Amino acid sequence: MANKNIIQQIILSEQEELILFMLIAGYTQNEIGEFLKVSRSYILKLISEQLCPKFQLKIVSTKLLIEAAVSYGFANLVPDHFLYSYLR
């Protein structure tokens, strides 16, 4: 069960939600960049400067980020804007 208190404390932008969701789903940084039409370096910068700090990670690591996000219940959340883009 997701820890709702932790999820409510970690506020993500729509783009951060989508990138985190795609990382948890197994997409690579390159694939996410292609999907969002941005460079892999932009994805890496967002992970290192925005997502890892929000999850209080001292080391920039996609693997640790995914593990933290899953442990907090983020694996159970599908971004609304991700769903809507496929339901149209």
Image (cartoon, helix red, strand yellow):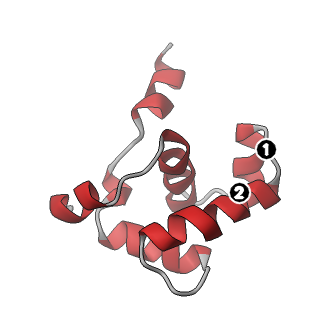
Q: Mark 1 = which residue? A: 38
Residue at the extreme top: 88
The residue positioned 24% from the left and 55% from the top of the image is 8
The residue positioned 31% from the left and 53% from the top of the image is 76
- Circle count: 2
* First in sequence: mark 2 vs mark 1: 1
Q: In the displayed structure, does residue 36 sit left or right of residue 20?
A: right
Q: Residues within 10 Å of mark 2 (few under 14, many from 20)?
A: some
Q: Kindly identify the amino acid type of the residue bearing the numbered disc 2.
A: Ile
Residue 80 falls in image quadrant = top left
Task: Identify the mark at residue 85; answer none if there is no mark.
Answer: none
Can residue 23 be seen by looking at this rendering?
yes
Q: In the displayed structure, does residue 6 sit left or right of residue 53?
A: left
Front-most of 6 and 86?
Answer: 6
Q: Secondary structure at mark 1?
A: loop
The residue positioned 40% from the left and 75% from the top of the image is 68
What is the x, y in percent for residue 37?
A: 78, 38
What is the x, y in percent for residue 18?
A: 52, 45
The residue positioned 43% from the left and 51% from the top of the image is 12
Separation (CA) of disc 2 from disc 1: 8 Å
Q: Mark 2 = which residue? A: 43
Front-most of 8 and 73?
Answer: 8
Q: Residues within 10 Å of mark 1 (few under 14, many from 20)?
A: few
What is the x, y in percent for residue 49?
A: 61, 67
Can residue 1 be seen by looking at this rendering?
no
Contact? badges 2 and 1 (CB < 8 Å): yes
- The quarter of the picture where the N terminus appears is bottom left
Residue at the extreme bottom: 58
Q: Kindly identify the amino acid type of the residue bearing the numbered disc 1.
A: Val
Q: Judge whether 16 appears above or below 81 on screen.
A: below
